[in-house]
Image (cartoon, coloured by chain):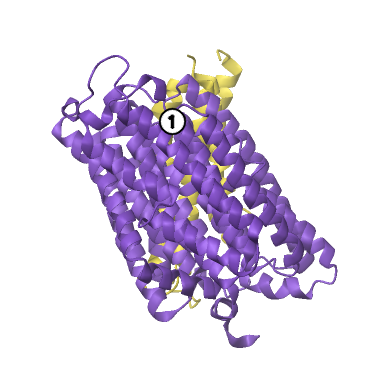
Chain colours: A purple, B yellow
Amino acid sequence: MSWYLTLPIVIPLATAILVALQRSGAAAGRWLSVGGSFLLLAAAVALVAQVWRHGVIVAQMGSWAAPFGITLVADLLSAAMVAITAIIGLAVAIYALADIDARREALGYHTLYQVLLAGVCGAFLTGDIFNLYVWFEVMLIASFGLMVLGGDKAQLDGGIKYIALNLVSTVLFLSGIGLLYGLTGTLNMADLHLAVREVEQTGLVTVVAVFFMVAFGIKAAVFPLFFWLPASYHTPPVAVSAIFAGLLTKVGVYALIRVFSLIFTQDIGYTHALLLAVAGLTMVTGVLGAAAQDGFRKVLSFHIVSQIGYMIMGLALFTPLALVGAVFYLVHHIIVKANLFLVSGVANRLTGSFELARIGGLYKSAPLLAVLFLVPALSLAGIPPLSGFWAKFLLVKASLDIGAYMIAATALVVGLLTVYSMTKVWAEAFWKPHPAGTAPVMVLLDQRERLALLLPIAALAALTVAIGLFPEPFVAFAERAAGQLLDPTAYVRAVLGDVR
Amino acid sequence: MNSLILNAATRVLVALMLLFSVYMLLRGHNEPGGGFIGGLIAAIGFALYAIAHGTRAARRALRTDPGRIAMAGLGIALFAGLGAALAGEPLFTGQWAFIDIGDGSKGLPVSTVLLFDIGVYLVVVGAVLTLVLALEDEV
């Protein structure tokens, strides 16, 4: 049983070690990274199948029984997140074959990348709040390295902002853990679920809840704590910003969902109402920020912020359907957003810039790329029949069901504005002629590079279309995942046994 | 640094520190000590050597890049954890073997816990020296 839970952490970690120790040269490191990501995907699929069939599965590290040892636990949400991490991890590892230069490889790009994947998988699988902090740190240290690797001036500038704000978040997170431990005397999340209910000073619990909200809010880039994201995500190489955009903020969202469905549900009237307000403001500010930008990746960075709002909205409404929407949105968004960043990288390679004013003509010269851009772009905006439509539909339906008209209207208007800024990118980068008069063509890249760049983009676009055309199995999956979140009895029993 | 006193003292001190670090590593099994503190002491030894004889000499004495030492340590620690999984128990469960030394006692205990600690020792030596040598390097 424990193999299913440990392999998604062990495989990328072992790959990182092998890449760092091998002496056969850069090519070997590259392919080790791809191979490791492929194995990770296999392990993740096995994990999802196992959780789907047998419910929540648990492993006690070192055989120290919960709540004293470190527990790894996977419910459907965790398993789905690990699977999506593996998918994006493999796609970006292949893309990196053509995107990361030899200098960055020599500095240890592949090692850091695999450590990052291990950190993300660890954060999704742990059942211990302090261990969650440790995985956050593993993930952050690897991401700090990736962010500044290569040492371009812009990268260092973005890196400083990224590091400074994430350290604030880390301190708050750690303080929150300290206070929570002081109140309850336990760190195991399933045990906390029970212990928090027995704390007499409910006001204090709410204070601690807000600590976690702010800490994870910074990581997830919600309003008003998001400004580090658009300041830094457009600086590193595309492969790096794609994996950051796809996964890192979503670890924050996952942590918010986990903590505010399992531990802090004693004062929903306060905490979740606060989250709902934050969600609305996040959506609006993100999309308005995107409308004002004119760099390809900057537009996309602001859209991450805007989209995070939708996921928080699902959590904040806290009805079964809303959580289904949040889980569905999370999976849909990771695929689409990482894919858009990958497309922006190819556009940059062909036209020579990320600045929308300076590029153009891609529709004529690279029609395949244009189609591959349209799929995730329209999905992001929520045009049927793509995956984003179902994600938004579920959330708006959930909010209308309980009469939350304000947030429903916000979500719809923000969807419209998303169409606006995706249209802007389309018109600038693809439709208008290239300002320098040159027609950027795909044959600029050699055969192998083209394959490495376009294969992951096409695969992720195909996945978006597949989710859009056949949403039923995905919604059914999200429904069961949301059921486990709303009623954590099975989770708690799996971790602690039947003793309580 | 060009100091005769430091050079002469280093010759004795480095050897003592490395020996003491191994002692700390092994002692950590049941008493205060362990891989982390042992690794720190060994790293101080090499750092002292780097101060006395320069970073190039220290790197030569290490024989390999400190980053690789850290990674090898991580690999050993991971391998120690996997040992339990191969035996069908959850990851990082201690596996013990007792070597009979013929004095009627339980025997000399050897465990994956010690292997894990050796991994920690190497990670600390490698990581600390990566930093120290990078800072000491004359650009």
| Residue B123 location (% of width, % of height) | 48, 45
Mark 1 lies on residue: A236
Q: Residue at x 54, y 61 (%)?
A: A396
Q: Residue at x 59, y 20 (%)?
A: B6
B47 and A71: which one is in front?
A71
Res B58 → quadrant: top left
Q: Is residue A488 visible?
A: yes
| Residue A218 location (% of width, % of height) | 63, 45
Amino acid residing under circle 1: Pro
Q: Residue at x 47, y 22 (%)?
A: B55
Element on which disc 1 rests: loop
Res B51 → quadrant: top right
- From what the image shows, is residue A490 above or below residue A137? below
A251 and A151: which one is in front?
A251
Q: Is residue A36 visible?
A: no
Q: How many marks?
A: 1
| Relative to A388, A210 lies left or right | right
Q: Quadrant of the C terminus of chain A?
A: bottom right
- Label 1 neighbour load within 10 Å: few <14, some 14-19, many 20+: many
| Relative to A199, A394 lies left or right | left
Question: Which of the chains bears the disc numbered 1?
Answer: A
Q: Residue at x 73, y 51 (%)?
A: A175
| Residue A320 location (% of width, % of height) | 56, 72
Q: Quadrant of the N terminus of chain A?
A: bottom left
A139 and A90: which one is in front?
A90
| Residue A248 location (% of width, % of height) | 50, 47
- From what the image shows, is residue A135 above or below residue A19? below
- From what the image shows, is residue A134 above or below residue A417? below
